[in-house]
Image (cartoon, rainbow, N blue to C red):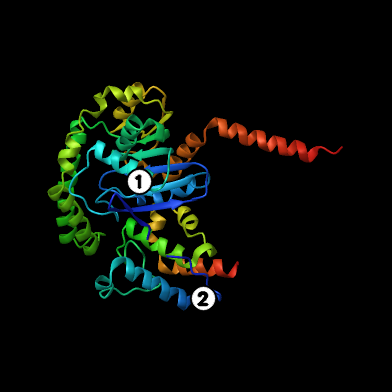
Amino acid sequence: MPVIQVKNKSVHIQELNKGARETIVLVHGMFSNLSVYYFNIAPVLAQSFHVVMYDMKSHGMSERCEYGYDLLSMTDDLRDLLDALHLKSVHLAGYSYGGLVAMKMAMRYPSRVKKLAVIEAPDPSDNETLSIIDIYSKEFLVDYINNYTDTTRMRMGKRQLDKNHRMYEYLFYETSIKEDMHNERFFFSDDTIGNIAQDTLLIYGKSSNCLPSGRKLYHTVPRSKMTLIEGDHNLPIQQPLETANKLKDFFIGWQVKFKQINHKLWQALRLSYHP
Amino acid sequence: MDAITTKHKLSNEEIFTILKSFITEVIGEEFVEDMDISRESSFARDLEMDSIEIVSFSEKVKSHFGENIDFTGWLSSMDLDQLINLKLDDIINYIETCQSSK
């Protein structure tokens, strides 16, 4: 299991197509893990790129940590990971809160981010967004009880319920995650968002609650373009292949495609040339 | 863990035993004791494995069988429902097919 030490913390990473010339780093959202990319999205991107996925602190199989869920700390973590993997400059894609981490990375360390893709990043000032962690917590507890008492429907097994319950309990009550996320509520008002210089792709679900956040970013991030896919906030799960292909096309870019076509034409000409 | 290149083709039963040991490593012996792991066991429903545990399991499969199989590629062709309904037998058959096509 690829767990590496980054600044004395254990970080679970997965890499595909290690030999490729360029790297894409994928950042998952809060209360999730790298599996959101692992099964469908990463393999598509790995057809052309070295792909790195990692579990954020206290998520997936990475080490637990009581502090540092604000965007400064999360981008410090990402910078340290890039250093540990000897990656000077990468393409970066982030989903949900991971999208905010990716944007903050582009703002703080522009030389280390080539192109930026933001999937379903919420505006942290939305009341709905601010209440998400509370809703998640309550929903989880309600589900927990319902699934335990209702034996007539398909339910999550006891082991998974316990495992999830432990994760939520830890994050909500033993770490600074709530406070740190709440303190990021003015992130969309940060003037430096307008200084993001990278080509930026914004991917949002057509029926997502976060779509207005995407539109705000589209008007703020100078070199951004927006693409919409059928689905809601859970886009990478609902439409993994379409999401992957949008990302791949964006990161490959028309210049590379043009070079590939050129190369094929040149080869065809050489083959047809008989002196 | 380095890839182990098997010199002979593993039997269906041998593959089943290896996969069962991987499941035990991923979810822990204390939970496996209460489970009846069979070829018909589905990962999500019967074995109650979540997505990050399936990642861990598939990494073990990749490490063990190495270049002989494109396990990630095979998984990536499945949608969420197919992944949820994936049975141990499906993986055994896939590995057997890869072995025989070498």
Q: Residues within 10 Å of mark 2 (few under 14, many from 20)?
A: some
- Disc 1 is placed on an element classified as helix
Q: Chain of mark 1?
A: A
Find residue A144 and report its horizontal and vertical position in percent.
Answer: 17, 56
Marks 2 and 1 belong to one chain: no
Mark linked to residue A81 = 1
Considering only vertical position in the picture, is A164 above or below A106?
below
Which residue is more in the foreground, A73 or A28? A73
Asked where in the image residue A269 lies, by quadrant, the reply is top right
Which residue is more in the foreground, A220 or A86? A86
Find residue A262 and report its horizontal and vertical position in percent.
Answer: 66, 33
Q: Where, quadrant-wise, is the C terminus of chain A in this rendering?
A: top right
Q: Where, quadrant-wise, is the N terminus of chain A in this rendering?
A: bottom left
The residue type indicated by label 2 comes to: Leu
The residue type indicated by label 1 comes to: Leu
Left or right: residue A36 compared with residue A45: left
Q: Kindly report the distance in space between the C-alpha atoms of the residues bearing marks 2 and 1.
A: 39 Å
Q: Residue at x 16, y 41 (%)?
A: A178
Q: Residues within 10 Å of mark 1 (few under 14, many from 20)?
A: some
Q: Residue at x 21, y 35 (%)?
A: A129
Which residue is more in the foreground, A234 or A148? A234
Question: Is any part of residue A105 visible from this angle?
Answer: yes
Asked where in the image residue A162 lies, by quadrant, the reply is bottom left
Q: Which residue is mark 2?
A: B10
Find residue A138 and report its horizontal and vertical position in percent.
Answer: 14, 47
Question: Is any part of residue A41 visible from this angle?
Answer: no
- Disc 2 is placed on an element classified as loop
Considering only vertical position in the picture, is A217 above or below A168?
above
Mark linked to residue A123 = none
Find residue A114 and report its horizontal and vertical position in percent.
Answer: 44, 33
